[in-house]
Image (cartoon, rainbow, N blue to C red):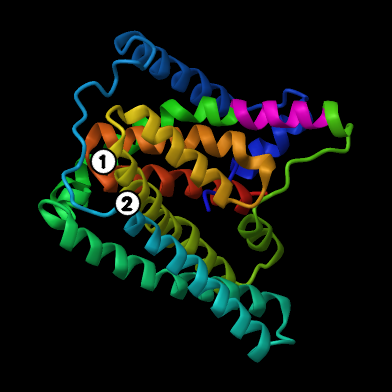
Amino acid sequence: MAIVGIANVTSILEELGGQTTTADLVVCIGGVLVLLVWALRTSLGTKSLDNAPARENIMPPLWALIPFFLWFGTVSVLYFIKEKLLAGLPDWQDAIADNLALCLGVIPAIVTSVMIARITFARGLKGLGLNPKTIPRDFVAAFLNLFAVMPVVLGAIVLTTIIGKLIFGDKFQMPQHEELKQIIAYSQWQVRALIVFTAIVVVPFVEELIFRGMIQTALRSYIVRPWPAIFIASLVFIVFHANPEHWLALFALSLCLGYTYEKSGSLFRSIFVHALFNAMSVLAALNQ
């Protein structure tokens, strides 16, 4: 549930009217420069992961899907229970219940992923990329990674909007993520605090654990080169998200997350990139 898109890129650059701020331009130009330097140094990215080793593990491929289905199934059951037992709640309380169900629903997936890592990965959780000693370094590096990918994500959002308008007419708009709609619609601090926690802490951790830590690692065990594994894991990642209008931007973000994981060997780094991206979107929505 990566939250596309910085309040949908300030309402898609004020409906493509060009009303951008100096900060927008600095972020985009700076990010493009970082991306260009990276591309030149790595032969357009083709050599960027030449020395990235696969994570040593004996995990059967299907085990990588167990946490995913546990997460999806548990959250679905909790939503069903909520609808049956808590029908008729005020809208803002219903939003709280939805986010609580999502937070609680990740627990079986996280516990299972940790158990799988401990059993099947060389060095256990450290082999998966969850080494607490790397957290300070990963947090700082995550800013640079996000800085580089932001122009690509923003460009994907604008391109999606342009194509949508050409196909569906001028009334086409990229739908906002449900979490962003809720944080704008409800001013109660309980709703906003829980959405912030869900979007910035819970979702980045569980999604990176499952899509990068489990699924991408399983793919890397059977695909020699890392980029095809990143590509396939990114396709799985975007299909999991409900809105096709978000897929192009999410795919660009997911490629960055997958690359970050393979390059650093640290799952914390991709978690931080994901969390920072979601935080930017939430802050932009709160400032609307």
Is residue 104 rendered to the left or right of residue 282?
left
Residue 267 vs residue 158, the one in the foreground: 267
Disc 2: CA contacts within 10 A as few (<14), some (14-19) or many (>=20): some
Residue 229 shows up from this direction: yes
Q: Residue furthest bottom?
A: 85
Asked if the residues shown at circle 1 and circle 2 are in contact, with their CB atoms under 8 angstroms apart, the answer is yes
Look at label 2 and name its amino acid: Pro
Q: Secondary structure at mark 1?
A: helix
Q: Where in the figure is residue 213, as x and y percent of width and height?
A: 31, 49
Is residue 243 rendered to the left or right of residue 128?
right
Residue 230 vs residue 191, the one in the foreground: 230
Q: Where in the figure is residue 57, as x and y percent of width and height?
A: 18, 49
**Which residue is depicted at the point 68% across and 58% down?**
181
Residue corresponding to mark 2: 61
Residue corresponding to mark 1: 221
**Which residue is depicted at the point 33% across and 38% down?**
142
Range shown magenta: 155-165
Is residue 188 rendered to the left or right of residue 220?
right
Q: Is residue 97 above or below residue 260?
A: below
Residue 280 shows up from this direction: no
Task: Tell whether position 220 is magenta.
Answer: no
Chain-order first, disc 1 or disc 2: 2
Q: Where in the figure is residue 197, as x and y percent of width and height?
A: 45, 64
Look at label 1 and name its amino acid: Ser
